[in-house]
Image: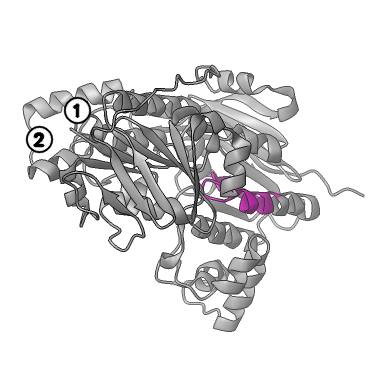
């Protein structure tokens, strides 16, 4: 006998405004048991606002939300947000066991912590469970932290799991194991899962139905994925259709202004105006990125370029050399949350020129950049928190557009942004390269590296450089074989 089909969460005619901005305008959404439900929509569509209302983070203005459960009046809901929420000074075991304390004063004994954490982590990564239970969360890589967050959510026995871009920094093997766990939980525990992702390949692999939100309204309501094509989904999201066109490969042969990156297993020559992709899990690319942005003097890589030191000693020195850096972790390494948009846009220039005040010409320039980037901002004096995640990411790119750069490093700049925003960022990066700026781009989405880059340096999951792929060898299978990652 199959388990009963329960309507765990029902959202009807939901409204929410922030000031004069109407974010939700009558939205409907239903989560059923025994289903994996894709929640889709462009940045700023209202997905995050709805999730925050469902989980009690903010109050709705109007509408009805009802909860049902086979075990209690309301189902237990666990959320894994796109940005990590681990306590850095606590161990892996303590972070996972934290949600099992009955109150803030409760104590979960170390042995019990270890048992809870080991059982939860073993579902996804048995090696991490055996090796790193007592490691501090601050010592984890980004993808290891993501695994710990997911394990913590799974350990609660929740009937509804809300997963916001949970695979953004997982390897192919980790993603596959996670999907197996999620399917098993749906099958055996009859839970409902809401999966937020911008990767259509993953959505097709995992999900049963999808709801599409556009401009605060429900455009598609719990439709079986088998009834929609990718182009129909993109259209319903209100995004321009993606034309599958191969970027014209540029023949970059000049040695003037080139940079030699000297690594432990070989050297890589990066020419002026070239886009060099970095493929693979964080262990390898992060070493090279730390060298270039001035935070990694212990990096195994070094630079050989005229007028440059082998290792920039600080981020300030990197900026003085003409090296820009855009992080995919916009909350902890990017956006200045307490400063207005104009100060965020001008932050890098201020560091380079040792200035602190906004001049009149800079205000005009900032407004032009905001318009050029299609930032949905009421004013350049608004705080970044008024922007959606994708628009905050554009803000980080804007810092460097009017700067005289020799090289710019992009670390997962499209992480968690919608299709339209991705294509806007691609266009900006191509323009920078065509103007002579050398670009180093790390992404865990192999498909965007293949579309955008001139060459790709691939790293395996242990952080070892495995080879430099020229355009005539570009394909997803080659990258997956070298990196152990599929996206």
Q: Which residues are magenta?
A: 159-179
- Residue 60 percent coordinates (x, y): 48, 39
Disc 2/disc 1 C-alpha distance (Å): 10 Å
Please state the horizontal and vertical placement of residue 444, each as a whole percent of the image. Answer: 51, 43
**Element class at badge 2:** loop
Is 400 placed left or right of 73 in the picture?
A: left
Queried whether the magenta region covers residue 174, the answer comes back as yes
Q: Is residue 22 above or below residue 165?
A: above
Rendered location of residue 429, percent (x, y): 35, 29
Residue 162 counted in the magenta span: yes
| Residue 404, quarter of the rendered image | top left
* Residue, disc 1: 366
Would residue 138 appear left or right of 199 to someone viewing this image? left
Q: Position of residue 50 (x, y in %)?
A: 51, 38
Dot 1, how many residues are within 10 Å of its Cα: few (below 14), some (14-19), or many (20+)? many
Asked if residue 309 is positioned above or below residue 389 in the image, the reply reads below
Q: Is residue 143 above or below residue 275?
A: below
Residue at the spot 62% in from the left edge and 65% down from the top edge: 121
Where is residue 23, by image quadrant? top left
Residue visible at 52% across and 42% down in the picture: 51
């Amino acid at each position: 006998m199959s388990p009963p089909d329960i309507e765990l969460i029902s959202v009807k005619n939901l409204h929410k405004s922030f000031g004069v901005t109407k974010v939700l305008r009558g939205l409907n959404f239903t989560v059923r048991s025994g289903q994996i439900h894709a929640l889709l929509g462009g940045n700023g569509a209202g997905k995050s606002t709805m999730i925050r209302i469902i989980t009690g983070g903010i109050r709705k203005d109007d509408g009805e939300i009802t909860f049902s459960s086979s075990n209690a009046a309301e189902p237990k809901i666990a959320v894994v947000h796109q940005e990590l929420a681990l306590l850095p000074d606590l161990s892996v075991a303590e972070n996972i066991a934290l949600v099992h304390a009955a109150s803030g004063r409760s104590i979960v004994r170390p042995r019990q912590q270890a048992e809870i954490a080991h059982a939860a982590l073993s579902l996804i990564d048995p090696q991490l469970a055996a090796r790193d239970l007592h490691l501090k969360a601050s010592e984890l890589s980004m993808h290891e932290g993501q695994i710990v967050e997911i394990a913590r959510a799974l350990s609660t026995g929740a009937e509804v799991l809300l997963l916001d871009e949970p695979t953004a920094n997982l390897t192919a093997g980790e993603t596959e194991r996670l999907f197996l766990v999620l399917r098993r939980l749906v099958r055996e525990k009859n839970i409902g899962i809401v999966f937020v992702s911008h990767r259509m390949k993953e959505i097709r692999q995992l999900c049963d139905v999808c709801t599409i939100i556009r401009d605060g309204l429900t455009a598609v309501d719990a439709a079986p994925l088998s009834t929609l094509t990718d182009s129909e989904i993109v259209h319903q999201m209100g995004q321009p259709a993606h034309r599958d066109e191969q970027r014209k490969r540029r023949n970059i042969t000049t040695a003037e202004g080139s940079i030699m990156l000297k690594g432990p297993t070989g050297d890589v020559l990066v020419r002026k105006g070239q886009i060099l992709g970095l493929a693979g899990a964080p262990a390898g690319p992060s070493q090279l990125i730390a060298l270039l942005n001035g935070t990694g003097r212990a990096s195994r890589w070094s630079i050989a370029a005229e007028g440059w030191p082998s290792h920039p000693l600080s981020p300030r020195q990197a900026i003085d050399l003409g090296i820009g850096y855009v992080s995919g972790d916009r909350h902890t390494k990017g956006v200045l949350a307490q400063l207005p948009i104009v100060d965020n846009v001008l932050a890098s220039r201020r560091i380079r020129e040792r200035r602190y005040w906004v001049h009149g010409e800079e205000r005009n320039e900032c407004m032009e950049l905001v318009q050029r980037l299609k930032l949905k901002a009421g004013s350049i004096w608004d705080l970044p928190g008024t922007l959606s995640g994708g628009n905050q990411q554009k803000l980080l790119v804007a810092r460097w557009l009017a700067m005289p750069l020799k090289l710019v490093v992009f670390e997962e700049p499209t992480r968690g942004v919608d299709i339209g925003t991705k294509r806007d960022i691609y266009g900006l990066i191509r323009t920078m390269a065509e103007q002579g700026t050398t670009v180093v781009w790390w992404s865990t989405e192999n498909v965007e590296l293949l579309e955008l880059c001139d060459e790709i340096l691939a790293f395996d999951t242990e952080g070892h450089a495995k080879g430099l792929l020229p355009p005539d060898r570009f394909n997803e299978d080659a990258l997956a074989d070298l990196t152990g990652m599929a996206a």
